[in-house]
Amino acid sequence: MPEPRSPSPPPVPGVTLKGDFNHQDQVLFTGLTLKVAAGVWTCLLGPSGVGKSTLLRLLAGLKTGGRFCGTIKTDDDLPLQNRIAYMGQSDLLAPWLNIHDNIVLGARLRGEKPDVARADRLISRVGLSDHRNKRPAALSGGMRQRVALARALMEDRPFVLLDEPFAALDAKTRSEMQELAFEMLAGRTVLLVTHDPSEAARLGHHIRILTEQGLSDYAVPSSLPLRAYDAPETIQTQIALLQQLRAPSHA
Ligand SMILES: Nc1ncnc2c1ncn2[C@@H]1O[C@H](COP(=O)(O)OP(=O)(O)OP(=O)(O)O)[C@@H](O)[C@H]1O
Ligand SMILES: [Mg+2]
């Protein structure tokens, strides 16, 4: 059953990160401008190690182990703090808590009363109702990733940062979870890191590619997401995007 929600969620701002970043012995980017457009999905692709997760961690206000010199500015000039849901590249589940308790952990840590019914609906929608009371160690990698996704969706925030959220899922479940996330995050400002050109072609209002040379925009189909996985424009974009990612200039 779809999650009950207001018919038109309030508009949310976008956010722009500008600046330079380096680890002790490695410059990751200089003069970078990453614009995450308001209320829509921006997909970020690029080779392994180029700095995608670092960008998400910077936006989320998490430690990166390096030095950022620049600005992170929202369109409404209000702080991002407490307005972000973040799903990291590793699932970061608490090993001593079962699925349900992991999903309501954010509320518990804030001292709020968790919405148990909403958590149970989410557990059902990610297909884990039969495993509600299991701990992470008793779950497969794909199951754990769905718990982490449910936890991010549970947060119900205007800014949502997803770092390869579907990477461990089988093809059928992946397409279903893309659809669930797209439905539940309508109107939010979403930044999705992915290595999967077909995922970006389905989900992206904007597609940006990060390389050592910097950030570039990639043309999306004229139709709006969520695009059917088998629509001609999705398949064309997927192929063209893969060709672009394989081009020597993107190595
Ligand atoms: N704590 C750290 N200390 C030093 N270097 C780091 C640290 N964390 C990441 N790096 C380096 O920063 C670079 C960018 O890492 P990041 O995780 O952002 O890449 P990524 O684009 O997300 O890669 P992937 O697609 O493999 O997830 C890598 O070269 C990595 O080795
Ligand atoms: Mg990464």
Image (spheres, rainbow, N blue to C red):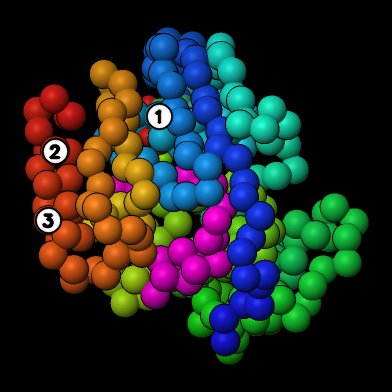
Secondary structure under badge 1?
A: loop
Query: Quadrant for ligand 1?
Result: top left
Q: Characterize the local packing of mark 3: few (<14), some (14-19) or many (20 or more) Cα atoms within 10 angstroms.
A: some
Q: In the rendered image, which residue does mark 1 sit on? A: 51
Q: Which residues are magenta?
A: 176-197
Circle 2 residue: 244
**Which quadrant of the figure has residue 207?**
top left
Q: Alpha-carbon distance for marks 2 and 3? A: 12 Å
Residue drawn at the location 59% of the way across and 24% of the way down:
72
Q: Is the residue indicated by label 1 positioned so its CB lies within 8 Å of ligand 1?
A: yes
Can residue 23 be seen from the camera position used here? no
**Point 17% across, 45% down: residue:** 241
Sequence-wise first label, 1 or 2? 1
Identify the secondary structure beneath mark 2: helix
The residue lying at 66 percent from left, 55 percent from top is 10
User: Which residue in the structure is indicated by mark 3?
Assistant: 236
